[in-house]
Amino acid sequence: MTTTRPAHAVVLGASMAGTLAAHVLARHAGTVTVVERDDLPEEPRHRKGVPQGRHAHLLWSNGARLIEELLPGTTDRLLAAGARRLGFPEDLVTLTGQGWQHRFPATQFALLASRPLLDLTVRQAALSRENITVLPRTEAVELTGDAGRVTGVVVREVDSGRQTSLEADLVIDATGRGSRLKQWLAALGVPALEEDVVDAGVAYATRFFQAPPGATTHFPAVNIAADDSVREPGRFGVVYPIEGGRWIVTLSCTRGARLPSTEEEFLPFARDLRHPVIADLLRDAEPLSPLYGSRSAANRRLYPERLDQWPDGLLVLGDSLTAFNPIYGHGMSSAARCAVTLDRELARGSTPSHRIQKAIGAAVDDPWILAASKDIDYVNCRVDATDPRLVGVDTEQRLRFADAITAASIRVPEASEIVTDVMSLNAPQSELGSNRFLLAMRTGERHPELTAPPFSTDELAVVNLDASVLAPAAVRSSPAA
């Protein structure tokens, strides 16, 4: 891309990454066309193009802040629609691989809502500019141009089959996990992209429940993680309070474990997790949905920045570039990081696409390594990667240090704050090796080990759970201040 202000830009895909990219492009291009295979609903409704959309999602504070910079008022609109703002770790009851997390005072936050509400709220604001045109029920067929420069894209109307060639100074692939970028590039004569894949075989099963009265607005999220010290397939569960007075409950497992496939199997799976608290919470909750399942959750990263020559006029971002295991909640924040990076690079003026793509790759590196390095430790994980942080000679040492990090973060406030900053993408992953963090691990005040879920007595009363089944030291009279 060699012009300061492209006359026309095309964005392929209208999920979170595509809509944010389109909004940014509208600041720098004359006109922007968004090509989307699905209809885009005017209400928070699931659509086929977001296959993970029925499962639990959270928007970490880093992503929320970046989206707020691009689209002021987004957080208020989400909260007005019923989304929850939870402080971390204070508003989370979580069993990590190393034990129960103390509910230290919140240092970061996350927004919890259904994925359709998150997407709709962002999309309505992002695509409202007059120079943005949306082509629904339309899909990309192929790129036009050659290995040196992309000049546009051929699109096809899904219903009629009619094809049209759209000329563009810049094309962005944000079509997600199903992207055909590798085939499109091969047709242009571009060498194959290097790719890393870390696939723990994660599968998800989700149901929505009506939460008990009072168990949404001031009730914590609940997370039961796998015991990563046991060499067997991982099993997980989360309960997130979301809009509409509902709980979204997602159960998951890694390759080798059997995920519930029927409604009758849902609660028994939850009860067989490392702690049965999720099943206890759901005992009297009213189911509002059938069971939804999916299995496309591998971590996958392409490396276009490693090519000696990248076609000018083409960029790739979002899940088309780097897809994550959704359990870590980094996908939407990564989309926001890509958009902010795109905005910054375009503001520089005449910038080669290769340089912009390299900057986008750097923006997703932290969420990539956080997700991939965690999943690689699960039994039966399939790894096809060249990233030395994943397959280097010190990989085992890195994994054991990760266990020590978790063990410190659940009991040492100073360590917890740093880990929360990193997990919410507000601090770089390298901070976990800093002198500040190492000092916190060694000398920080270590709180007693918790032996049961750290609910307050008021929280237990709301959900009608008996405090006598919990260790007395684990029951707090009120949340931490």
Image (cartoon, rainbow, N blue to C red):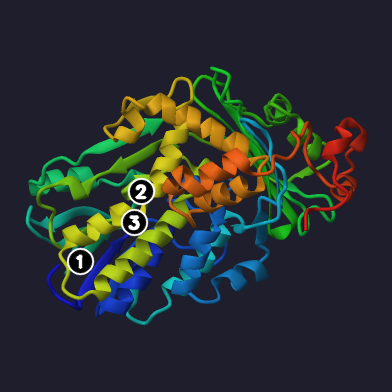
Residue at mark 2 to residue at mark 3: CA–CA distance? 38 Å
Q: What residue is shown at x 90% (from left), y 47% (from top)?
A: 461
Instruction: Determine whether 248 is above or below 125 in the image.
Output: above
Q: Please state which of residues 211 and 193 is positioned toward the viewer in this rendering.
A: 193
- Kind of element beneath mark 1: strand
Residue at mark 3 to residue at mark 1: CA–CA distance? 26 Å
- Kind of element beneath mark 2: helix
Look at label 2 and name its amino acid.
Answer: Asp
Q: Earlier in the sequence, mark 2 or mark 3?
A: 3
Position of residue 456 measured from the top left corner of the image (x, y, whole percent): 84, 47
Q: Which mark is residue 302?
A: none
Circle 2 is placed at which residue position?
Answer: 365
Position of residue 193 measured from the top left corner of the image (x, y, whole percent): 19, 41
Look at label 1 and name its amino acid.
Answer: Leu
Task: Give neighbour class at mark 1: few <14, some 14-19, many 20+ (Cα, 10 Å).
Answer: many
Circle 3 is placed at which residue position?
Answer: 159
Q: Earlier in the sequence, mark 1 or mark 2?
A: 1
Q: Residue furthest bottom?
A: 130
Circle nearer the viewer, 3 or 1: 1
Residue 161 in view (yes/no): no
Residue at mark 1 to residue at mark 2: CA–CA distance? 24 Å
Q: Please state which of residues 407 and 477 is positioned toward the viewer in this rendering.
A: 407
Q: Where's the C terminus, which quadrant? A: bottom right
The reply, left or right, for residue 370 in relation to residue 149 is right
* Residue 369 lies in quadrant: top left
Circle 1 is placed at which residue position?
Answer: 170
Q: Are marks 2 and 3 in contact (CB under 8 Å)?
A: no
Instruction: Determine whether 20 is above or below 101 in the image.
Output: below
Instruction: Determine whether 116 is above or below 401 in the image.
Output: below
Q: What residue is shown at x 50% (from left), y 34% (from top)?
A: 402
Task: Give neighbour class at mark 3: few <14, some 14-19, many 20+ (Cα, 10 Å).
Answer: few
Q: Earlier in the sequence, mark 3 or mark 1?
A: 3
